[in-house]
Image (cartoon, grey):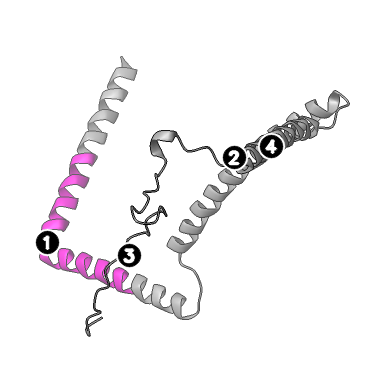
């Protein structure tokens, strides 16, 4: 029972002290003199921070915000670098697997390139053959498309080709 009274007394004192502190804080905040002093202290702090930033900037010393921004940038670059390192490790493992066979890792590429070159040579010879075949002799003109020469009735010679009429060139051309 003594413990319960001790607990009750402690709770009552804690409650009363909390109430007293709350009332004191509220009275202080409502007091115009204290309120003005707090406002001035915060504005002075703000001016001091701006003055400190200006002085540090003039001395070319980075601010805390600059340091934080650089820290984030370094973390970002570190993560990117780790990704690149992982990729290089994967490539290294792949090359090790290819070399494990005892074969040159580029031999497959060289074989493919040789096959492409052989196919290009074959296509070039086919194109040359087609070009020679088309240049060999002109295709004969079908009979329906041949021009017939008309003979002059007087002397039995073919009639001369009609001339184009001459036109005067204008001065504006």
Q: Which residue is mark 3?
A: 163
Residue 3, placed above or below residue 75: above
The quarter in which the C terminus is drawn is: bottom left
Residue 90 in percent (x, y) is at 69, 32
Contact between labelled residues 3 and 4, with CB atoms less than 8 Å apart: no
Q: CA distance from mark 1 to mark 4?
A: 96 Å
Q: Earlier in the sequence, mark 2 or mark 3?
A: 2
Q: CA distance from mark 2 to mark 3?
A: 34 Å
Question: Could you tell which of marks 4 and 3 lies nearer the N-terminus?
Answer: 4
Is label 2 in a helix, a strand or a loop?
A: helix
The range drawn in magenta is 18-47
**Who comes first in sequence, dot 1 or dot 4?**
1
Residue at image mark 1: 31
Q: Is 117 placed left or right of 155 in the picture?
A: right
Contact between marks 1 and 3 (CB within 8 A): the answer is no
Q: Tell me which corner region of the image, top left, top right, bottom left or bottom right, holds residue 117.
A: top right
Queried whether the magenta region covers residue 62, the answer comes back as no
Q: Which quadrant holds residue 80?
A: top right
Spatial CA span between label 4 and label 3 = 52 Å
Which residue has dot 2 on it?
134
The Cα–Cα distance between marks 1 and 2, rounded to whole angstroms, is 110 Å
According to the picture, the residue beneath numbered tag 4 turns out to be 120
Q: Is there any visible trace of residue 82 in the rendered image? A: no
Between 169 and 62, the residue placed more toward the observer is 169
Query: Quick one: SS at disc 3?
Result: loop
Q: Badge 2, how many Cα within 10 Å: few under 14, some, many 20+?
A: few
Per the rendering, the mark at residue 155 is none
Residue mark closest to the camera, 1 vs 4: 4
| Mark 4 residue element | helix
């Amino acid at each position: 029972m003594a413990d319960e009274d001790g607990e009750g007394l402690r709770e009552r004192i804690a409650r009363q002290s909390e109430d007293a502190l709350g009332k004191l804080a509220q009275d202080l905040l409502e007091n115009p003199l204290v309120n003005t002093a707090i406002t001035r202290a915060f504005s002075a702090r703000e001016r001091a921070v701006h003055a400190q930033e200006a002085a540090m900037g003039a001395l070319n010393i980075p601010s805390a915000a600059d340091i934080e921004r650089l820290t984030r940038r370094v973390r970002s670059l570190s993560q990117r670098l780790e990704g690149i390192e992982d990729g290089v490790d994967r490539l290294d493992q792949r090359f090790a697997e290819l070399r494990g066979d005892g074969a040159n890792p580029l031999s497959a590429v060289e074989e493919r390139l040789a096959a492409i070159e052989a196919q290009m040579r074959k296509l070039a010879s086919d194109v040359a053959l087609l070009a020679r075949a088309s240049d060999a002799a002109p295709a004969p003109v079908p009979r329906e498309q041949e021009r017939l020469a008309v003979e002059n009735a007087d002397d039995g010679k073919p009639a001369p080709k009609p001339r184009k009429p001459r036109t005067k060139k204008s001065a504006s051309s």
